Amino acid sequence: MSRDAAVPMKATPPTSRQVRAYFAPVDRNAGAPTVFDAAVNGRFALDAPPAPWVDLGSVSGFARSSATKIEPLLCGSPNTVSSQVRQTLEATVKLEFQSWGKLQLALTTGTQQMNLPVTTGAAAATVAVMTGSTATCVQVGASNVGAFAVGQMVAVDVDYAPGTTGFVGSGVSAAYVSAAAAVTIGNDSNYTRRVTLNTGRVAAIGTDSVTLAEPLIAGAPTPEMAVMPICGFADREGGNFFQEWSALFVLDGEQGDRVIFYYPRLQAMQGATETENSLSKLLMRWNLAGAFRALPVTDAMDGERVLCFRSYLPAI
């Protein structure tokens, strides 16, 4: 055999410096998660995930567990184990986000995650979206650019139509209105923008547009939408609405291998929680702690009900 011929390497346990987290919307009306095919996209660049996955950076304390119960099936006399059955299907994920942002807050809160509108000055006005806008460049008109400032956050979504019920929010279902009377703020057309996850940070201001640092999660805004400057976010303990997302967790091995955990449907299983990490005697860092329960989907390949897919891509 030639000394240049390929020699199979023994498989070694994956060794990774970090766990990267990516989340994508679930179509709540259709009950359809974002699909991920490791055979097609398993080797994606970590800093450029395939659309519509959103990179939420490295996470710490990543721990996934299976609570699926496997029970023996007994028959005969005396009872004899003839086979096994899965009696309960359950899985959970716990982690800590190392950065704070709109999506990290929403994920760890579980319920509605509100936007705080700017209430004073020119920025207090909501500005209509004009044609020609893209996911990163929102056309607002030359007379309206003064309402925005570089570094400012904005919420982009449609007006709330009084009496509308069901899921609201473009790109991601941000809240559920069970009855028109449940929207206690009355006929405020900004309600959808108050809860939407279709937000961004202004990176630059042009003569008639604002450029965002990251693409809007709902894609290019339509002329039916408007832009509302916001100054921050707020969430509440309690409520009936549950956030639901598809998730990918990637362990990129130092030797070229990769492990991917794909959860088609995750819902938060606790309220907003932070963890305290000491940096020095005077400084504390606060991480957002998340705990999620996996919900089942039906695998189109064979009709099986599953919670999670684990993929292992050996080093090439």
Image (tube, rainbow, N blue to C red):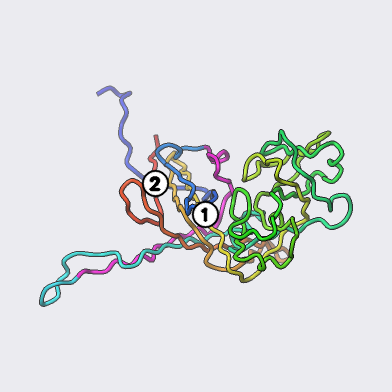
User: Where is residue 84, by image quadrant?
Assistant: bottom left
Residues under numbered marks 2 and 1 in contact, where contact means CB atoms less than 8 Å apart: no
Residue 200 position (above or below residue 85): above
Residue that label 1 marks: 29
Magenta stretch, residue numbers: 45-73
| Amino acid, disc 2 | Ser
- Rate crowding at label 2 as few (under 14), some (14 to 19) or many (20 or more) other CA atoms within 10 Å: some
233, 66: nearer the viewer: 233
- Is 303 displayed left or right of 262 in the figure? left
Query: Residue 288: horizontal and vertical position, in percent?
Result: 62, 61
Question: Residue 104 bears which disc, if any?
Answer: none
Tell me the chief SS of the magenta region. strand
Tell me the SS state at disc 2: strand
Residue at 45 percent of width and 62 percent of height: 92
Q: Which residue, as the protein is rendered here, is positioned at the far left?
A: 77
Residue 21 position (above or below residue 165): above
Query: Residue 309: horizontal and vertical position, in percent?
Result: 39, 51
Residue 70 located within the stretch drawn in magenta: yes
Residue at 33 percent of width and 23 percent of height: 4
| Amino acid, disc 1 | Asn
User: Where is residue 278, by image quadrant?
Assistant: bottom right
Name the quarter where the N terminus is drawn: top left
Residue at 33 percent of width and 37 percent of height: 9
- Is 276 displayed left or right of 3 in the figure? right
295, 72: nearer the viewer: 295
155, 49: nearer the viewer: 155
